[in-house]
Amino acid sequence: MEKVVVGMSGGVDSSVAAYLLKKQGYDVIGVTMQIWQDEDVCSIEENGGCCGLSAVEDARRVADSLEIPYYVMNFKKEFKDNVIDYFVLEYLQARTPNPCIACNRYVKWESLLKRSLDIGASYIATGHYARIDKLENGRYSIKKSVTLAKDQTYALYNLTQEQLSHTLMPVGEFTKDEIRIMANELSLPVANKPDSQEICFVPDKDYAGFIIKYLNDDEMPQEIKQLITQNGTKFIDTGLTPGNFVNTAGEVLGKHQGLIHYTIGQRKGLNLAMGRPVFVLELRSETNEVVIGSSEEVFSNRLYANHLNFMAIENLDPETEMVVDAKIRYSHPGARCTIKKIAKDEVLCVFDEAQRAITPGQAVVFYQGDYVIGGGTIMSKL
């Protein structure tokens, strides 16, 4: 009997995933990853954090109900190093990060998989709405779930072939309603628990407040200290201190609060009396400027991406252009585009139609049909 470690968040999806795998004959072990740091645990509980103490208790009750062994594993350091530090560094450099993608790659897979293999498991499993197929070319690829309304493939594009070969995603074959029905039929204690919606370590959505508090911590990560030292006060100023709102012609329109407070496409919270709706077009860390423009100016038909990870194919031939559908954020429906490799770790993506708010720091994920071809991190739209 093959052993599988199921990452249990205390939610309904991972709980049903554990049930489905046990039903399929696997030796199932439930594990919750302890990733919360020293923040106020009560705050996490009140805001529905996916990895707080209530998640542990919910997962433990589900494991008891399913009669499977259950453990809590400490991943605090891995989460801090690969998710929180990355999150802060990206905002300080005028980019908008995607911490869930980093968490998936480096914590939920890389770290959990290693520990799971060490204890004799053949696989890890999660409650993600996605599927994994081994293609005719011998490579593994993420495939969209049967329910596009809950599809989570965008956040999984960065997984490696080794990780995919040791991963099971049973929930991807079902709709959310079907998962809820199963959970109720099994009388699981989390059957009607609402989904967690926010970033687990910033439950109040105040990203800037979190970053400011983090930078004032006596235990600020060495990497961030070094980056600040290397760039001097200019670097920290461009992230945290006020600067100018400007239009595309360079005319000053007003004062902003600091670049960490803004992202591309933002309209609310600008406090600019322009007599018409205006949006953030660009964050200029070198001059500490936020560029403002019209709704039409938020659109662009191209982007450059790096930190590439290919999945359904081994690589992209530099001499070949490939037509794909690309998603530029989790909620983006995807749009037809042509991609071409222009450097060892860089692609140019040209859309058939201009897309709104292409945002440096976010992921762009390429699909053909239901399969993930690969993806990368958006560098710029210029």
Image: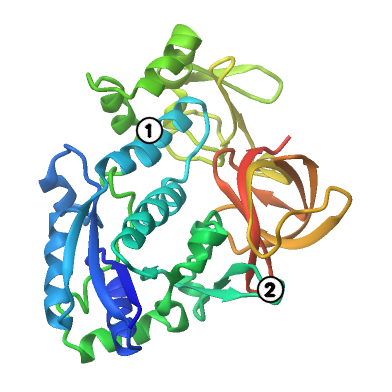
How far across and down, in percent of the image, does residue 199 sit?
A: 33, 49
Q: Position of residue 102 (x, y in %)?
A: 44, 47
Q: Residue at x 30, y 71 (%)?
A: 14
Image quadrant assignment for residue 236: top left
Q: Would you say the residues marked 2 and 1 are in contact, meaning their CB atoms lie under 8 Å apart?
A: no
For badge 2, the amino acid type reads Gly
**Residue 331 visible:** no
> Residue at coordinates 18% horizontally, 77% vertically from top-left?
68
> Does residue 199 appear in this view?
yes
Q: Nearer the viewer, residue 233 or 218?
A: 218
Which residue matches tag 2? 369
Say whether disc 2 or disc 1 marks the residue closer to the N-terminus: 1
Disc 1: which residue? 85
* Left/right of residue 137 with respect to residue 122 in the rendered view: right
Estimate how packed mark 1 is, as few (under 14), some (14 to 19) or many (20 or more) residues with alpha carbons within 10 Å.
some
Q: Where is residue 343 in the image (x, y as percent from the top left)?
A: 77, 38
